[in-house]
Amino acid sequence: MNSIMQLTLLLFLLVGACRADYFFGDLKDWFDKITAPNEYCNREWITLDGLEADLGRNLIGQHIASDVILNAMTGFKNNDNPTKPLVLSFHGSSGTGKSLASQLIVKNIFKKGMDSRFVHFFDSVINFPHASQVETYKSQLQHWIRGNVTNCAHSMFIFDQMDKMHPAIIDGIKPFMDYQYKLDGVSYQKAIFIFLGNAGGEIIRESTLVSWKAGKKREELKLEDVKTALSSVVFDFWSSAFWMSINVVDFFIPFLPLERQHIVQCIMVEMVAMGLQPDHNKVCEMADKIVVYIPDDERRISVSGCKRVASRLRHFMQ
Ligand SMILES: Nc1ncnc2c1ncn2[C@@H]1O[C@H](COP(=O)(O)OP(=O)(O)OP(=O)(O)O)[C@@H](O)[C@H]1O
Ligand SMILES: *[C@@H]1O[C@H](CO)[C@@H](O)[C@H](O)[C@H]1NC(C)=O
Ligand SMILES: [Mg+2]
């Protein structure tokens, strides 16, 4: 190794003797390659920066989720000695911002963002599609979690479409999230697990409508108002062994259904992204045209949140 380096240097020197500018350019590239190529499992690469501002700017209409996420993340990151990994479970109907919120978390923790090698995504439907292979998936997943946490204690695991995950796989990953000093010599306390799913979406929608009918402002809606209703559904929904036995989930986070005013905001954001001047009347017209609202009598809540707003907007703006 040493002699190869010396040889390379010598070669550069010889070339450089004739072409000094090339020499320094090449040397710099070479130096950059060996000094800053990688991502490391340390505070320089893994922190918690700007999440509050980012959630405030980009996650529309989700004051409960924003607050709980921020508190959970800050508390966890400020704790040098957490007793268990952080486990968040996002609930809500489609297009309410669950994936977006998880992306914002990743972006503000890992300097390399979604490209970080310490973040691992799984989608139950894509990654674990066949019920007949559940045992294989389970042991593979256990192997990966163990391997990745061994490499970097701050690893993050995100599981999408959790409501379609096979109970046996869920059972298989449960031990990693528990209060456990060490499991087979590996400590999981600094890892973060995030689950995304639609379970509880209906209940959250109902709670929102009920409180709205009672004359309560959306912003006054608190976690407690949704939590009781949500927990019963969530407990029913998933294998009781997982959710009931020990509290592996630290925070159940509800994503409220998005209303017309939020669709308007999503359209504004999208128009700006398309390089268009968002005109208020046009935006309101679009909000009525491209989104279906429920319930039939009130027409208040978007069926699919802000999902497909972008593509439908493009279609109508042609
Ligand atoms: N609360 C929100 N604020 C801003 N944009 C949003 C919000 N909710 C959804 N969007 C936008 O709508 C699209 C879909 O959102 P996202 O993928 O986060 O939904 P989801 O809750 O994960 O839905 P699903 O349950 O179908 O996976 C994204 O482009 C996102 O930017
Ligand atoms: C880490 O997880 C990825 C999947 O995201 C997997 O491909 C890889 O093999 C795992 N690494 C180890 C060391 O287990
Ligand atoms: Mg999603």
Image (tube, rainbow, N blue to C red):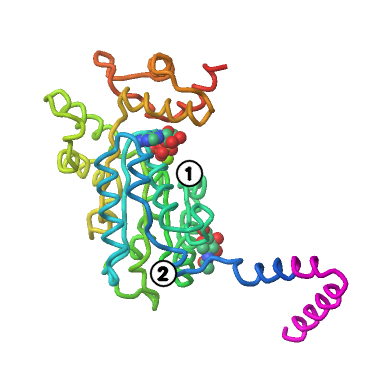
Q: Which mark is residue 104?
A: none
Q: Residue at x 34, y 46 (%)?
A: 53
Q: Residue at x 28, y 20 (%)?
A: 300
**Front in this rendered view, residue 269 or 118:** 269
What residue did someone put label 2 on?
A: 153
In percent of width and height, residue 7 lies at 80, 82
Q: Residue at x 43, y 15 (%)?
A: 282
**Front in this rendered view, residue 229 or 166:** 229
The boundaries of the magenta stretch are 1-26
Instruction: Work out which residue is located at the far left of the displayed protein and give it.
Output: 214
Instruction: Work out which residue is located at the far right of the displayed protein and give it.
Output: 18
**Quick one: label 1, few (<14), some, or many (20+) residues within 10 Å?**
some
Q: Earlier in the sequence, mark 1 or mark 2?
A: 1
In percent of width and height, residue 121 lies at 48, 52
Front of the two marks 1 and 2: 2
Residue 171, image quadrant: bottom left
Image height check: is 16 above or below 309? below
Q: Which mark is residue 125?
A: 1
Q: Amino acid at mark 1?
A: Val
**Front in this rendered view, residue 198 or 293:** 293
Q: Amino acid at mark 2?
A: Ala
**Front in this rendered view, residue 248 or 45:** 45
Image height check: is 91 above or below 286? below
**Quick one: label 2, few (<14), some, or many (20+) residues within 10 Å?**
many
